[in-house]
Image (tube, rainbow, N blue to C red):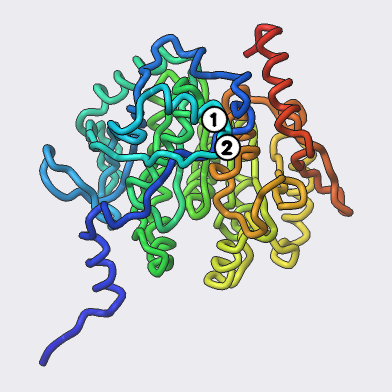
Amino acid sequence: MIHYRPLSALVLLLLAFLPAGCRPTVYLMPTPAVMATGEVNPFARNPDLDESGRVEVLFATNRSPMGGDAHRSYTIFPGDDLRLGIAHLSIGREEIDWGRIFALSTSDIPEERPAWHLDRIEEMAVIPLENGAEGPGEGLEPFFQVVNEVLERSIDKDIMVYVHGANSSIYRAAAQAAQYRHFTGRNSLVLAFLWPSAENLLAYGTDVQHARRSAPAFKRLITLLAAKSRAEHINILAYSAGAQIASPGLAAIGRDAARDRGASLRLGEVYFAAADVGTDAFLSHLQDYLDIPRSVTLAVNLNDTILAMAERHHGVSRIGRPSPADVDDANAAFAREASNSGRFDIIGVDRDTVAGLSSGAHNFWYAHPWISSDVLVQFLFHEGPEVRGLSENRDSKGLRYWTFPPDYPERIIGIIQQAEAEGNG
């Protein structure tokens, strides 16, 4: 008798071995509004700028490995270790020189953007995760020697951890992280947490399962960065289904911190963009860790079409597109109080307040120049929404939220120029 594997298992096995060339191409994102006129130029602030298309980001992954050290690749399945290293990327490879990259990165000229390429992955350390192992692993000290040397040379002394969304390959996630590093003038150290997405929209259910299994690895990563790096702050940008990892992971960190008040996690900005995690779950998690980071930001688009589909899958609204029906009285009171405390900022984005934004936008943190600009400024300067030029609002129940004013581009450029003139840039 012939036994057939379930179709879903066959699909996952096929996806695990698809060549990287089948993945959607990532292009240099639109220039953030704060840089689009050339008046604010973070590249000029980098004394060690490599004037080429080469960009490196750190990575951490709990994907299971495939191949030897010289030919390392990673599957779409969770593994038993946390693997750390460097992802080497390039913009446009050899067909575009630095002068053109610089021009495209400091203006909003309507020209085709060059593609990102993942040139190679350099694995440096392996940390055991199985059965709660807390051993030192292999290569940890050399990896953090590199981290701390880069921080020493960098103007920005923080580490930014990027947690990608569902349906994302290693290439796509690393390229999104590299977008951020590039547009800081390559002044910021960025680490991409490459959790095992199945890399296919049809396998969203598998991504949900893998995200759930990845939260402990994310927690271990953050505690390692706090213990081993000399970063002034550890900032976190969780995009889409990355919130299904960062939100419970931070809650677990918060519960541990309550038991160990001597721990210094140095969490700075925590930013959730189009967060694909249950509304009720997010607010419950937030109560466990809100007092640890400098601030928590939630960017919300009530018309987000991707999160509408995710809501149908889960049967509950997502916090990036929340429904009041999914918020009980206690959580509503907590959200209202937290939003007025200065530690929890809600940013509303829609086509009525953000010029040129499509109604159902989901990828707005990197695809829209106003929003990417605000993310960069927040992480680099650790300033609240009011200082960053956003407009304050309150709903009928007293929940505070922020929106972009019509003159945002001119306003943020003026704010940064004034800060630089005063010596605060």
Residue 306 falls in image quadrant:
bottom right
Asked whether residue 150 appears in the rendered view, the answer is yes
Q: Position of residue 54 (x, y in %)?
A: 33, 27
Question: Do labels 2 and 1 touch, CB within 8 Å?
Answer: yes
Q: Is residue 2 above or below residue 151?
A: below
Q: For the point 27% across and 39% down, which residue is it?
A: 83
Drawn side of residue 200 relative to residue 300, left or right: left
Q: For the point 75% across and 56% down, which residue is it?
A: 330
Residue 261 falls in image quadrant:
top right
Q: For the point 24% across and 22% down, which residue is it?
A: 142
Secondary element under disc 2, as helix, strand or loop, is strand
Asked whether residue 272 appears in the rendered view, the answer is no
> Label 1 belongs to which residue?
267
Q: Is residue 422 above or below residue 81?
A: above
Q: Position of residue 55 (x, y in %)?
A: 35, 28
**Name of the residue lying farthest toward the bottom:** 1
Q: Amino acid type of disc 2?
A: Val
The quarter of the image holding the N terminus is bottom left
Q: Position of residue 347 (x, y in %)?
A: 71, 44
> Label 2 belongs to which residue?
270
* Disc 2/disc 1 C-alpha distance (Å): 8 Å
Q: Residues within 10 Å of mark 1 (few under 14, many from 20)?
A: many
Q: Position of residue 270 (x, y in %)?
A: 57, 37
Q: Amino acid type of disc 1?
A: Leu
The quarter of the image holding the C terminus is top right
Drawn side of residue 103 relative to residue 26, left or right: right
Q: For the point 73% across and 21% down, which residue is it?
A: 414
Q: Residues within 10 Å of mark 2 (few under 14, many from 20)?
A: many
